[in-house]
Image (cartoon, grey):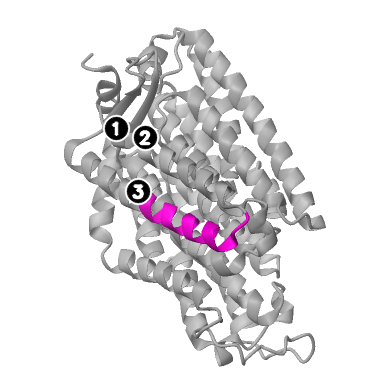
Amino acid sequence: MNGLLVLPVAIPLITATLALLFRKSSAMQRWIGVAGMVVLLVSVLILFRDVYVDGIQVLQLGNWDAPFGITLVADLLSMLMLGISAVMGLIIAIYSIYDIDKQREQFGYYPLLHVLLMGVNGSFLTGDVFNLYVWFEVMLIASFILLALGNSRNQLQGALKYVIINLFSSLIFLFGVAMLYGMTGTLNMADLAVRLPEVENVGLVTTVAMIFLVSFGIKAAIFPLFFWLPASYHTPPVAISAIFGGLLTKVGVYALIRVFTLLFTQDVGYTHTILIWVAGFTMVTGVLGAASHFEFRKILSFHIVSQIGYMIMGLAFNTALGLMGAIFYVLHNILAKSNLFLISGIAQRLTGTFELKQMGGLYKHYPFLAVLFLISAFALAGFPPLSGFWAKLTLVKAGLSLEAYVITAVAILVGLLTLFSMTKIWMSAFWGTVPEKGVPEHFGKMPLFGAGNLYIMVVPVMIVAGLIILVGFYAQPLLEVCLGAAEQLLDPSQYIEAVLGPQ
């Protein structure tokens, strides 16, 4: 048993508690918030080394052996997700120093951010479906309050839609958990993987699989369950939009990958065909939504939906290459998508608006910011040799190897449409002329770097852009780790043996 598995959950909890103790001091909360993220990242890297070298790590809390106790499990998929979450958590904590106002800090922004990370990390590490439900609820509570902090009309409208649809998702999830327990008498995932194939009523198992698809599909914002996302993610401060856009939907994708590779593998011909259709419609509707809007963050929100479709496509292929592509796509998308949200925040600080029709001239006055945007936008569209290119290429190769020509063609077409909507942002905000009215006096005079300026927001964006380039030019090592994660998913015996012991 590896005691380090408790750290990705315990560190955010301790950090949130410390930040609460210093709630009257904004400066202390900021330092505690950033320091907690650094400690979390270090602990995740150490745990990653253990999993990569020694294989799947397990911790039975309270020394209650599975399937009776609470199990934490870390395989390569969990660690990749934990790693990217810790990186983005640190980036967002730094960006928040300038982006989050004092009122939100005093109402508990930093404690809530760490509670959110605790829920995300718990979801990646839990070894049973009921605790997955619990961690989802922790995330939901923290994210709802973060979304509503500020009490603006748009925020409250968005938060209301967000919480209602996610509560509905949780109810469905709980119903599915109850059905699973009724069929098998266990909720431990490894034990479920052993017992579900013994259930004679395959149709009932497939029905539960569809229940989980709907529940996790709402959280992942797949077609046709995505409508809540573009209505809410553009309303809070940018730092919150970025962590939501980058991470939260990916927890839903992670849950789908986990249950449809470990638990629901009895009727792949039916379930994964549905996943293929869902993937195609998710890609197309998301990118068409992005093409029809002219508000910076709304375009990015619809792109979240579109990009989720690629990840579901890789899951639906159910091959090592497909799953490798899906996992790599998740990692790349968290970097690129979060960075575009962060850049939108800097653009808003400079121009005073998120509306593209009221922006212009950013390239002329801030060429360095334009370069950072192009790196993230080209990565999202799949330009070589940036990270998105390898993600899309892997999925296209996986599709062609299965002769799945239609969904592969859809993926390529959606990539072109993604480029179109990124071009729309570029032409309006960066390349266009400066509007004659409504431009703040500081536009063109406020430097990106220098004391008291935007550097605290720009430096995190530079770091993420650097990671996108690094992943693009040195993709092979990360692809190999993703392939290892995919092979672990396709051979559940490793996971089952690690949790339950030799069978």
Q: Main secondary structure of the magenta part?
A: helix
| Image mark for residue 398 | 3
The answer to whether one can see residue 333 in this image is: no
| Three-letter amino acid code of the residue under disc 1 | Gly
Q: Earlier in the sequence, mark 3 or mark 1?
A: 1
Helix, strand or loop status at disc 1: helix
* Residue under the point 52% across and 59% down: 28
Region in magenta: 24-40
Does residue 326 appear to the left or right of 158 in the view shown?
Answer: left
Return the x and y of residue 298 as percentages of the image width and height: 67, 62
Magenta stretch encompasses residue 490: no
- Separation of marks 1 and 2 at Cα, in angstroms: 6 Å
Marks 3, 2: nearer the viewer: 2
Badge 3: few (under 14), some or many (20 or more) residues near its Cα, within 10 Å?
A: many
Q: Which residue is mark 1?
A: 3
Magenta stretch encompasses residue 36: yes
- Separation of marks 3 and 1 at Cα, in angstroms: 37 Å
Return the x and y of residue 97 as percentages of the image width and height: 55, 66
Residue 41 vertical placement versus 237 (above, below): above
Return the x and y of residue 424 as percentages of the image width and height: 62, 75
| Three-letter amino acid code of the residue under disc 2 | Val
Q: Are marks 3 and 1 in contact (CB under 8 Å)?
A: no
Badge 1: few (under 14), some or many (20 or more) residues near its Cα, within 10 Å?
A: few
Of residues 298 and 462, the one nearer the viewer is: 462
| Three-letter amino acid code of the residue under disc 3 | Ala
| Image mark for residue 6 | 2
